[in-house]
Image (cartoon, rainbow, N blue to C red):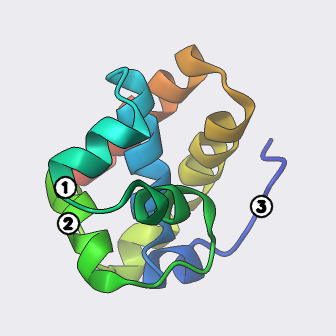
Amino acid sequence: MAIFDFNLTQYFEGYRYIAVMAKYLRTKNRQTRVKVASELNIPITTYRRLEEDKNFRNEAIIKKVANHFNLEMKVDYEFISKINDDFNEFYNSTYFGDIEYQEKMYTKLMLNFDS
């Protein structure tokens, strides 16, 4: 059961999912924000805002981050409906630090992207 439950459509339209996935992948790969920001050639403060600010809307930066982590930036409403519950679970796990559960939910989500 998700603690934070939200309409995933809005999350995808605002590309907020890119920040959540990037944070997970950065953590999983044991990279610091400083390292990722440096690799992207953007200020650390900008990268930090991307991960933390739910209203971050700089599409050029979001696109750079998506490309860096090989994440899709398309909005497919049928697909969003299909993954809504799993993404809610993944989102919650990123904020509560359960890395094993994050990996399980990330793998489950990625299987949807491959199908």
| Label 2 sits on residue | 64
Q: Position of residue 32 (x, y in %)?
A: 40, 32
Q: Secondary structure at mark 1?
A: helix
- Figure check: 69 above or below 54: above
Q: Earlier in the sequence, mark 3 or mark 2?
A: 3
- Figure check: 104 above or below 23: above
The disc placed on residue 5 is: 3
Look at the image and tell me whether residue 111 can be seen.
Answer: no
Q: Secondary structure at mark 2?
A: helix
| Camera-side mark, 3 or 2 | 2
> Are dots 1 and 3 in contact, CB under 8 Å?
no
Image quadrant in which you'd find residue 62 = bottom left
Q: Residue drawn 51% across and 55% down?
A: 48
As shown in the figure, which amino acid type bears the numbered disc 1? Leu
Q: Nearer the viewer, residue 64 or 78?
A: 64
As shown in the figure, which amino acid type bears the numbered disc 2? Lys
Image quadrant in which you'd find residue 80 = bottom left
Local packing at callout 3 (Cα closer than 10 Å; few below 14, some 14-19, many 20+) is: some
Local packing at callout 2 (Cα closer than 10 Å; few below 14, some 14-19, many 20+) is: some
Q: Position of residue 35 (x, y in %)?
A: 29, 37
> Are dots 2 and 1 in contact, CB under 8 Å?
yes
Q: Residue furthest right?
A: 3
Q: Earlier in the sequence, mark 1 or mark 3?
A: 3
- Figure check: 23 above or below 58: above
| Label 1 sits on residue | 40
Q: Is residue 100 left or right of residue 4?
A: left
